[in-house]
Amino acid sequence: MSSDNKQPEEPAACGPEQLALIRETVRKAKVPKAKPRTWRGAALAKELPVARVMVNKGVLHLDQYFDYAVPEELDADAQPGVRVRVRFGAGGHRVREGRREGGGLIDGFLIERRAESDYGGALAALAYVVSPEPVLSPQMLALARAVADRYAGSLADVLQLAVPPRNGRAEAKPSPEPLPPPAAPEPGSWVRYGRGAAFLEALATGGAPRAVWTALPGPQWPDELARAVAATLASERGALVVVPDGRRAARVDAALTALLGEGRHALLTAESGPEKRYRQWLAVRRGSVRAVVGTRAAMFAPVQDLGLVAIWDDGDSSHSDENAPFPHVREVLELRAAHDRCGFLLGSTSCTVEAAQLVESGWALPLIADREQVRKSAPLVRTVGDGELARDEAARAARLPSLAWQTVRDGLKSGPVLVQVPRRGYVPRLACERCRTPARCRHCAGPLEAPDERDLNCGWCGRGAPDWHCVECGSTRLRAQIVGARRTAEELGRAFPAVQVRTSGRDHVLDSVPDRPALVVSTPGAEPVAEGGYAAALLLDGWAMLGRPDLRAGEDALRRWIDAASLVRGQSEGGTLVVVAEPTLRPVQALVRWDPVGHAQRELAERAELGFPPVSRMAAVSGRAEAVAAFVASAELPGDTEVLGPVPLRVTDSGRPRRPGDPPVGETWERVLLRVPPGSGAALAAALKSAQAARMARGGTEQVRIRVDPPDIG
């Protein structure tokens, strides 16, 4: 270091306490700002020679900017927003004169150029600029910081989600010239909703309306979304639409192309491939395209002059990112609507509790159709409860009640029939036939299985259970808790040998089926669209979906039922839906009345009374028992925080995929839930982030996972 910035030397004879005091005094002393220089003495940029860089280190105690010197040869390319490579670690970002630059090369983003650095010593120089393309705008940086703060995460982790990996070939190609704005579209089927036409007009005239839209059943919703996008483009602003999966993105893409033609929007999905997707993303960033339709990652798309953000089916689990810090599309788009002061549209054929809260709080207005429109569009809904199943010989013999068989026969006379089963597979879970207590192994409490209808075996330890009996009622008879798509397809194939049976599930998802008699067996979310709509539909084993030990079980079951029922022809066209579930249950009644909004409002009122999300804010902390206890004790939580737990956390369902937050295989963790009332969510996230950063800075090796707003709380 140069003499003018030389720090006091430590006396050789000082004890540990004196040394600590001297170090603290030096640290707190005001160090004069130094001109940037490197140990190599290389020539630096004449103006703004300091680059402030966000390095791609997603650890909380390094969630800050670091200063680097800008060499003269990189002056032109080293502009805010570009990708850079820098040395980091072992003092790599700040070096002392005469020492060799340490640390390895790491990616980062150049945030800003400055004349001086707050650091008084010598700065390491930028290694090189990866590309002169400015991929990180100030607006996107502000959004990423807001998302990181909300979810107690690091800015680097959010930027990993927001900015796609670079593709050199795509970057080298110029983007097309932007097309002139289109004319404002006609309202079309938006007139079916009370304020629908006014909502489109507000978008077309530069307004920023916010709405929760409960779409009518039927195939019109992609066209209605396309008209909202077209109205926004007519005002010379951009629009962003995020849907749960590629199939629905393709439907909105086709609707936009039919309405506006080619070249006015970009499709951002994983199916596009890295080069094409990055080329489309660059076209959006450069302003060549002002409308985006995409899946979850598109929530960060850099649309210029944003006028509308829209999300379809916010209750779908695909909208919750499985990478830290686990943001949800709905919350990110709400932040974008607030930051950019643009319009907001949350659409679904159902209604989540979060959507109902947006309306109740006055943040968004409801867009719903009147009851007459609902009756015309929705199918006739009929129910089969437990009492009817017990008296039905056909149901006892083949699991399908007589009403369902008759509905299938009648529907096949005029078109395809949809059969929804809760899960894929072949009898994945078994339960007592009399009281429905899950059948479990007496040795390890694992689930009992009967693959291919053979002897009972434990799904965890593999031991046989030939003498099983129910521990609750003593019965020795079993029933399939959930019979999957394969087994159901086989049963229906035997019952209707002259009819084609098709399946749609995780391994093979059908996009559409023709308008001719066929049986389509599907798991929830994989239902193909039928040309002209399904003549009828069966929703089997509804009690299994409602019986999940989860706060959202009823809401999620109703959403999945309504999604499937929306593919069935309306009651005026003879469409019929049969749901096998107890008719007195609230979600079943909401389906019969086709009243998802009323169901969400009642759920919201109950959660408000009990202090459940979304009225309260929650965070889950999981890890080994000792690590979780130490973490919670060290965190400076808000005074109104309620600590729930700890409880054991283990994967109890051997059939489901592993999720973020699950304990490693072979380990048992504990989980603590932290709950705060409205208004304290930001303070809770800040406290958790600070505690995690301090723990990692101290070198804590025990893993502790934090998830704000966990989707599954039991």
Image (cartoon, rainbow, N blue to C red):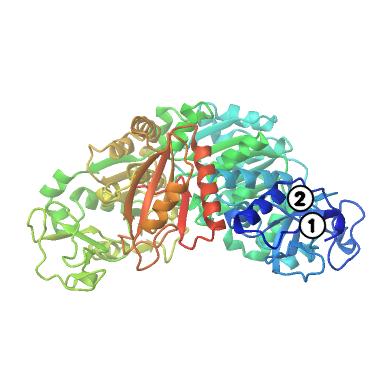
* Quadrant placement of the N terminus: bottom right
Marks 2 and 1: which is nearer the front? 1
Q: Which residue occupies the foreground of this view, 463 or 46?
A: 46
Q: Residue at (24%, 50%) from the top-left corner?
A: 404
Q: Left or right: where does residue 699 sit relative to residue 657?
A: right
Q: Which quadrant of the structure image shows residue 487?
A: bottom left
Q: Which residue occupies the foreground of this view, 421 or 557?
A: 557
What residue type is disc 2 on?
Ser
Q: Left or right: where does residue 232 sit relative to residue 542?
A: right
**Residue sticking out furthest to the left:** 474
Q: Position of residue 34 (x, y in %)?
A: 84, 52
Residue of label 1? 121
Residue 295 in view: no
Residue 225 in view: yes
Q: Position of residue 111 (x, y in %)?
A: 75, 51
Relative to 514, residue 686 above or below:
above
Q: Which residue occupies the foreground of this view, 409 or 674?
A: 674
What residue type is disc 1 on?
Gly
Q: Position of residue 390 (x, y in %)?
A: 12, 49
Residue of label 2? 288
Q: Are marks 2 and 1 in contact (CB under 8 Å)?
A: no
